[in-house]
């Protein structure tokens, strides 16, 4: 605390990201990073960008990257916004679109950054409980006013909504923005991007941090009607004109262009998820049906906190949240086969000792 803080700072309760500890031999399954490196072509492009040209500012509009993303997603460049990780894209989205007369709606269990942006930006919000099976129920949103943000697949549950359900949500809220945070969509959910042509209120946010293994590069983007994108650009240009450096723009372009690598990497994650789900079920865990690169699990006989602590003592890091509805669960990132074998071995040992 400092007496020099502005009043705003006193009222903040910042987001706490998953730990990034330096533990030798650590199996790190706590922040949904990819166990594989990014496309070698992306690394090559980033290296090539580490050149004399770094003395020059990057393209503030990231024109080429937006063109490449537009071609990939079959939209036009005016329908694409890029930012420094999808966290920054989300922050600008909250400022540009989600502060309206009626409170912003989002699930009670979702990405815990959403209420943090609301407090920073003075946005009134109301949470809508997930149902008993931890699913988002669109029926609980359709008759309420106010903009909406939903993560699809949801985090930390991993459960996905269908594109048809997203269309129903967007149609029911046609006079306000509906934002779909698709950070994990590439691991098995349907993207809502094809709906943007029919729904001028629909904004889809994606990231290159997960399925493209570029969390360290910080590139995220949003796709929606040109009017929504213009709103985001106005906020960005009132905040930081150059959110993506030259290496980030170059690396992101090369990653999108290397589709073979992307497809291969994500299919391994999907396979490892199925194997891990089966292995955890054999150990007595209840595993929510995941369309993401993590699973959300609980054991009937062991608390989430106790399991997370016991795993940490064995140099296996998973994510545990203390919020009331999810305190019994662990969120486990889908790692490589070797990492997941280390996890299941450690769990077997912990369950045998405490069973
Ligand atoms: N949305 C969701 C649901 C997430 O879990 C994350 C990762 N913490 C993000 C957005 C932000 O990811 P990034 O800023 O790396 O794009």
Image: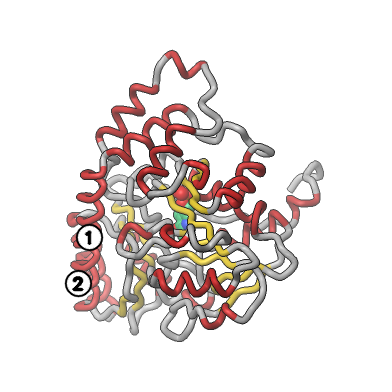
CA gap, disc 1 to disc 2?
A: 10 Å
Residue at point 38% right, 49% down?
A: 74
Residue ID at (38%, 57%):
30
Residue 156: image location, x then y, percent: 43, 67
Q: Residue at x 45, y 62 (%)?
A: 195
> Looking at this view, is 251 or 302 the one in front?
251
* Place of residue 96 in the rendered image (x, y in percent of width and height, measured from the top left): 66, 52
Which of the labelled discs sits on residue 290, or is there none?
none
Q: Quadrant location of residue 275?
A: bottom left
Q: Quadrant of residue 49?
A: top left
**210 w.r.t. 254: above or below:** below
**Are there few (<14), some (14-19), or many (20+) residues within 10 Å of tag 2?**
some
SS state under label 1: helix
Q: Give the mark, 1 or 2, whose residue is nearer the N terminus.
A: 2
Q: On the rendered structure, is 244 left or right of 70?
A: right
Q: Who is closer to the viewer here, 53 or 342?
A: 53
Q: Quadrant of the C terminus?
A: bottom left
Image position of 186 (left or right of 106): left
Say which residue label 2 marks.
279
Q: Secondary structure at mark 2?
A: helix
Please give the name of the residue rendered at 20% of the width and 73% of the height, measured from the top-left corner: 278
Q: Label 1: few (<14), some or many (≥20) within 10 Å?
A: many
Is 41 situated above or below 118? Answer: above
The location of residue 289, given as percent across then percent down, is: 32, 74
CB atoms of marks 1 and 2 within 8 Å: yes
Find disc 1 in the rendering and name its residue: 340
Is any part of residue 18 visible from this angle? no
Is residue 200 in sight in this rendering?
yes
């Amino acid at each position: 605390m400092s007496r020099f803080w502005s009043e705003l700072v006193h009222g903040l309760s910042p987001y706490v990201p998953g730990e990034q500890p330096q533990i030798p031999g650590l199996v790190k399954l706590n922040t949904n990073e990819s166990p594989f490196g990014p496309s070698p072509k992306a690394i090559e492009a980033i290296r090539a960008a580490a050149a004399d040209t770094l003395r020059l500012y990057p393209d503030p509009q990231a024109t080429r990257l937006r063109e490449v993303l537009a071609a990939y997603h079959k939209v036009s460049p005016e329908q694409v916004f890029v930012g420094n990780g999808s966290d920054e894209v989300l922050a600008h989205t909250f400022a540009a679109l989600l502060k309206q007369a009626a409170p912003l709606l989002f699930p009670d269990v979702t990405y815990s950054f959403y209420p943090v942006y609301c407090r920073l930006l003075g946005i009134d919000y109301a949470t809508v409980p997930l149902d008993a099976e931890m699913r988002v129920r669109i029926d609980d949103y359709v008759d309420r006013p106010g903009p909406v943000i939903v993560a699809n697949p949801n985090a930390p549950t991993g459960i996905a909504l269908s594109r048809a359900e997203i269309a129903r949500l967007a149609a029911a809220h046609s006079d306000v923005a509906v934002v779909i945070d698709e950070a994990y969509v590439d691991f098995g959910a349907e993207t809502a991007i094809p709906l943007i042509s029919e729904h001028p209120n629909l904004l889809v946010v994606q990231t290159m941090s997960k399925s493209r293994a570029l969390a360290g590069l910080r590139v995220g983007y949003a796709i929606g009607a040109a009017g929504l994108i213009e709103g985001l650009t106005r906020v960005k240009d009132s905040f930081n004109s150059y959110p993506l450096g030259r290496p980030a723009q170059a690396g992101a372009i090369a990653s999108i262009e290397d589709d073979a690598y992307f497809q291969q990497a994500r299919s391994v994650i999907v396979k490892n998820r199925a194997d891990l789900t089966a292995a955890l079920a054999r150990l007595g865990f209840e595993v929510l049906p995941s369309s993401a690169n993590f699973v959300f699990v609980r054991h009937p006989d062991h608390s989430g906190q106790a399991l997370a602590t016991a795993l940490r003592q064995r140099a296996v890091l998973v994510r545990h949240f203390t919020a009331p509805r999810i305190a019994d669960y662990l969120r486990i990132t889908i790692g490589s086969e070797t990492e997941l074998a280390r996890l299941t071995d450690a769990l077997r040992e912990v369950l045998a000792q405490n069973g």
